[in-house]
Structure formats: structure tokens, C-alpha cells
Amino acid sequence: MNSINQTMIEGFRLKGVSDVPDLQVLIFLLVLLIYLICLGGNLTILLLVCCDLHLHTPMYFFLANLSIIDISSSTTALHRIFVIFTTHNHMVSTSACMTQLYIYCGLISSEISILAAMSYDRYVAICRPLYYHTVMSRRLCGLLASVCWNSGFVQDLPLFVSISRFTCYISKEIDHYFCDILPIRDITCSDTSLVDLYILTVGNVNVFVLLSLTITSYVFITSCILRISSSTGRHKAFYTCSSHIMVVVLFYSSIILQYIGTVSGGNMGSNKILSLLNTAVVPMMNPLIYSLKNKDVKSALQRKLKC
């Protein structure tokens, strides 16, 4: 008989970001501010892309998809912080917890795919400019976006099914502010070998392949830019890619930091801070980067403000 107290539970208790009472208000206000900036920035990008004809191009079509993912992922991950602070209710049902986990993982997987699709768009724009509008047709853009969204959720479905089949837990308290894979795995007494194998193979391979495609695109892009004779042309070509490069670096840096912090045995407090970077700060920064670094977006915003 296993000496561990195995319990079948119908819900979990989310511990939250911090147990220190004096920090609760500060953390809530900080996360709320970041979330509102994230929401406002990404909604602004969405409205501009929808309403301004100058932004009806493949690049901004994918940017709009990225904004939808950022709004959805940050809302999915952060809303329990607001619920816990305002209602002092830390409990979440098992079905709601599993739904949150599946939606969040699917959105992150979709974001990785969208970033790869955006790098391909930049490759065609700079390395095959004469064929850009032929290659990046509305049909292809729609197909790429559909594949990115569907592949993210289809890919994570086996992982979700495996976790939802956990039958017992050593505790009902999840040491996190939302239902994430590793905190749930850490409290289960069910067999986690399938989950670990899936993360190690499908999860890591998917990230590696899409990151490799993104890097390969920029290797070709860099080669094409360096062959441009005029410095003005090189600067203009690089400038069109700079926003996307910054977003890619920021996204993958947060993912890698969170992963290293988890596997290196760091304390859960530091892991939750790294998770906040990925679930709150990165979605907030993406629209700011595109707003500050992109002339088309700034021009579209100025035109709308003058109306």
C-alpha cells in the first residue's frame, strides 16, 4: 500500500502569486496595470488592422492574429489572480482547471506557429519581393493562420487527455496562480510517464522545428540584406524585420528562462515570477514594440486620432 495520502478531488486550491499579505495589493495592482496595457495595446493593433486599408497586408494580418493570441493567453492565465484578490476564493473546479490548462497550452503552441509564419512572410517580402503579392495571397495567409491555430490545439490534445486522466493527487493545492502543466504534475500520484514523454518529444520537437524555421528564414533574410548595394536599402530592409525579431527574441527568451528555472530546481516563487514574464509582460510588450518600431502602425494610429 502506498504510504502517500492519495485523494480523489473535485477541485483544486490555487495558491496564488505570493503568500505574503503585505504584497497582495501591490502584486494585484501591478498585474492589473500590465494586463490593462496588454489589453489596450493589442486591441488598438486589432482595430487599426481592421479599419485602416493601409494595413490590409499579410504582415499585419498575422500581427492581428498575434494580438488575438496575446489577449487570449494573458486573460486565460491571469484572470484567476483577479478572482482570488477580489473574492478571496482560491478554489477552482477540476473541469475549469483542465479547461484553462488546455486553452493556455493551445494558445502558446499557436503563438509559436504564428511567429514562424510571420518570419516566412518577411522572408518572401525581402528575398522574393517581386513575387510577394503572388506568393502571400489572401488564400495562403488564411490557410497558414488556420494551420497555426488548429495545429496548436490539436497538438496539445493528447497532453490534455493524459493530464485529465490523472486519478489521484497527494494534495489539492496547486502552488501557482493558474493551472499549468508542471504544478499539476507535481501534486499527482498517478503515472506521469506519458505526460513527461510527450513534453520531451512532441513539445520540444515542435518548438525546435518552428524555431529552426524562424532562424533559417532570418539567415536567408540577412544574406539578402547584405547583398543590397545601398546602405539606405539595407537599413530599410532590416527595419521592416526589426519589430518581429524583437518579438521573437522576447518570446523565446521568456520561454527558455521559465523552462530553465523549472528544470534546474528553482523555487516555485522564482518560477512564478518567470511565468508572469511569459503570461503578462511579453503579451504587453508585443503591441508596444510594433507601435514604437513600425512606421505604418504609427501612421495609421495618427490618421485615426485625427478623425
Image: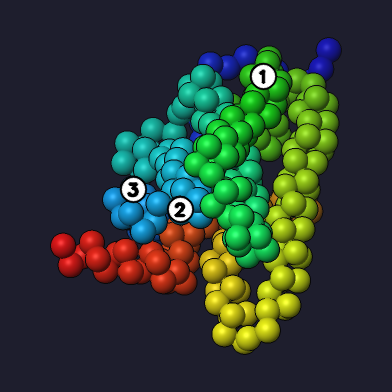
Q: Is residue 28 left or right of residue 148?
A: left
Classify 10 Å Cα crowding around label 1: few (below 14), some (14-19), many (20 and above). few
**Residue 280 visible (yes or no):** no
SS for dot 3: helix
Which quadrant would the N terminus be assigned to in this image? Answer: top right
**Residue 89 visible (yes or no):** yes
State the CA–CA distance, disc 1 to disc 2.
38 Å
Image point 74% across, 51% down: which residue?
213
Label count reads: 3
- Picture layout, residue 31 above or below residue 188: below
Q: Is residue 164 left or right of residue 1?
A: left
Image point 68% across, 74% down: which residue?
225
- Quarter where residue 183 is shown: top right
Which amino acid is tagged 1? Answer: Val
Q: Which residue position holds label 3?
A: 50
- Picture layout, residue 186 above or below residue 226: above
Considering depth in this image, is 53 or 14 the residue closer to the camera? 53
Q: Which residue position holds label 1?
A: 161
Residue 306: percent from left, percent from top: 18, 67
Considering depth in this image, is 261 or 48 the residue closer to the camera? 48
Image point 36% across, 59% down: which residue?
54
Image point 82% across, 38% down: which residue?
200
In front: label 3 or label 1? 3
Classify 10 Å Cα crowding around label 3: few (below 14), some (14-19), many (20 and above). some
Which quadrant would the C terminus be assigned to in this image? Answer: bottom left
Considering depth in this image, is 93 or 224 the residue closer to the camera? 224
- Quarter where residue 300 is shown: bottom left
